[in-house]
Image (cartoon, coloured by chain):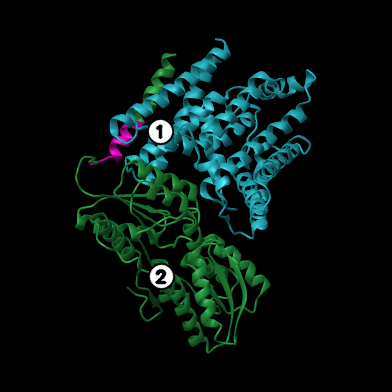
Amino acid sequence: MHPRFLASGRRLGTLAGLFGLCLLLWILTPHFLTVSNLLNVLEQTAINAVIAAGMTFVIISGGIDLSVGSLVALSGVVLGTLLHAGVPMPVAIAASLGVGFFFGVLNGLAITWGRLPPFIATLGMMSVARGCALLFTDGRPVSGFDAAFRNLATARVFGIPAPVLVAIGVYIVAWFVLSKTRFGRYVYAIGGNEEATRLSGVNVRLHKMCVYGVSGLASAVAAVLLTSRLNSAQPIAGIMYELDAIAATVIGGTSLMGGEGGLGGTIIGALIMGVLRNGLNLLGVSSFVQQIVIGLVIVFAVLIDTALKSRRT
Amino acid sequence: MSHRRRLAAIVVLVVLAMVAACNRGGTETSARPRVGLVLKTLNSPFFIEMQRGAEEAAKRLNVDLVVQAADREIDVERQMQIIENLIQSRVGALAITPAGSREVVPAVGKANAAGIPTIIVDTRLDPKASADAGVKTVTFIGSDNVLGGKMIGEYLVKVSGGNAKVAILEGIPGHETGDSRVKGFRGAVGAAPGIAIVASQPANWERDQGFTVFQNILQAHPEIDTVFACNDMMALGAIEAIASAGRAGKIRVLGFDAVQDARKAIVEGKMEASVAQFPDEMGRVAVESAVKALKGETVPPDQGVRIALVTRENAKQ
């Protein structure tokens, strides 16, 4: 069977899962299918969805990025500190995005030039970036920003919350890069067969470095949204966000083996997690059971993936 | 293809079964007032006690109580999501134990906008952040942590005869609860010139961090003879560090919260004193205040819950 067809078939399956879940919640609670709750779910999903967009690049390239949660914290505290120092908002945001990109590229350097496995390199960065964030702020949150910055979280355009629009923007750009540019094609090629890609004359090191830069950049965008949402930049923010982002990507059908998957699936994966958490809160399900349900959904999603692969080979 | 469909069907069925199983008696149509209690976490004895107190009061007052908490105590963004979701499910009133005294303020603002009376329990909202955002709360229910820190500090002055070299294990930096305890403690021991605070470092409320942080402090300052940990979990970690340094019984350990393990340690002589809070009472008062607010009755804006010093004499309870 043609791989592309399979990929879209998988995505349809995930989409069906999302609709099934929504249907179920619609039957179980009158509070789920309301305009205000659906917007609420989208708003809550925005941050994870943005991080997961970067994670999708990394995982398609055959890697993993465990440092995203710490990079959210680090870019966030840089942003918060600059805003408090009176730096104009666009400059502060640009600087924070720069920090995310830079630390992402450092991951890439350790992986390409240092030849470290991505798991180890980004695990190290997870600790380094967290430490930097704590050191930079002396462990204390930086909070209280002006209304213009808070608008990034609270404003609504035609009723749609601003964070949702930012996430949509991120996905449009990411989709364009991944499917319409040479860089995007190389990301798939590197994940599919790195050695063959290198032998066909592609600068694999450069492109892999960029992949981790993209992931760092996505984390920084998420940091801007998070800082605005909480009206505070915490050095302890984003702990375990890497797992949520990996889960959204994997539920969305991107293979941890690399070389296949896409952003469409990831956005559905992020929505499944958001809807699930929202629904379980609406139903008043015990917090412990919520963790079990979310874990099972992740495992079953990957189970489907593996089952599909074994059929194909 | 059919294989995939079958798997997908299994996923949906499992989720359906689990949700149905967990949603026992979710009576949406009943006229009972619905109150949401959002805790910091459900994996610490303190909050489990609080939940128990709240559930007892809910049963007595015929309240439909929904208790939710984030997986991780410090995950304030997830706590905000839970609050937003409870607002969507139209709870009548909310009681919140803030995971961040500033970070929860926007979520309280959303509850205000939805007209849902909000009660703050255990950790105060940051006064400046809430004033800036113009948020309103019905009442604050909690221990006076400054007083608690003062009590344990005065106890130290008494038993040490005014001479001690002290290390402090702080909670998460910037947390009002821990900061207040340290403030009260420093205030009390400041009166005794012979008491020196040699080191003060955060161990983020956690037992394993209490262990490693105190181990490091002991390396740097072997002269220390007293440790005050802002909660018992860190104190218990410090006790293990003292034992592994071979100095058991030589260092005075003071804690806070008087959890079961700490009371046991006090009876066994491994720990000197702690301060008991009454989280079950906080839970009870929170539900009672929610009911009063829903009936339109007046609720005092600040409701202190009693605290008590626990030493060897009264640890067995």
Q: Main secondary structure of the magenta part?
A: helix
Q: Is residue B160 left or right of residue A104?
A: left
Segment colored magenta: B15-25
Q: Give the chain letter at badge 1.
A: A
Q: Which residue is mark 2?
A: B258
Q: Mark 1 packing: few (<14 Cα in 10 Å), some, or many (20+)?
A: some
User: Which label sits in the foreground, 2 or 1?
Assistant: 1
In the depicted structure, whether residue A101 falls above or below residue B182? above
Which mark is on residue A8?
none
Q: Give the chain letter at badge 2.
A: B
Q: Which residue is mark 1?
A: A38
User: In the rendered image, which quarter is residue B138 located in?
Assistant: bottom left
Closer-to-camera residue (B91/B7): B91
- For the residues tagged 2 and 1, is the chain the same? no
In the depicted structure, whether residue A149 falls above or below residue A163? below
In the depicted structure, whether residue A92 falls above or below residue B134? above
Q: Is residue A201 left or right of residue B186?
A: right
For the residues marked 2 and 1, what is the alpha-carbon distance in whole angstroms? 44 Å
What colour has chain A? cyan
Closer-to-camera residue (B22/A160): A160
Q: Amino acid at mark 1?
A: Leu
Q: Secondary structure at mark 2?
A: loop
Magenta stretch contains residue A96: no
Magenta stretch contains residue B16: yes
Q: Position of residue A165 (x, y in %)?
A: 53, 32
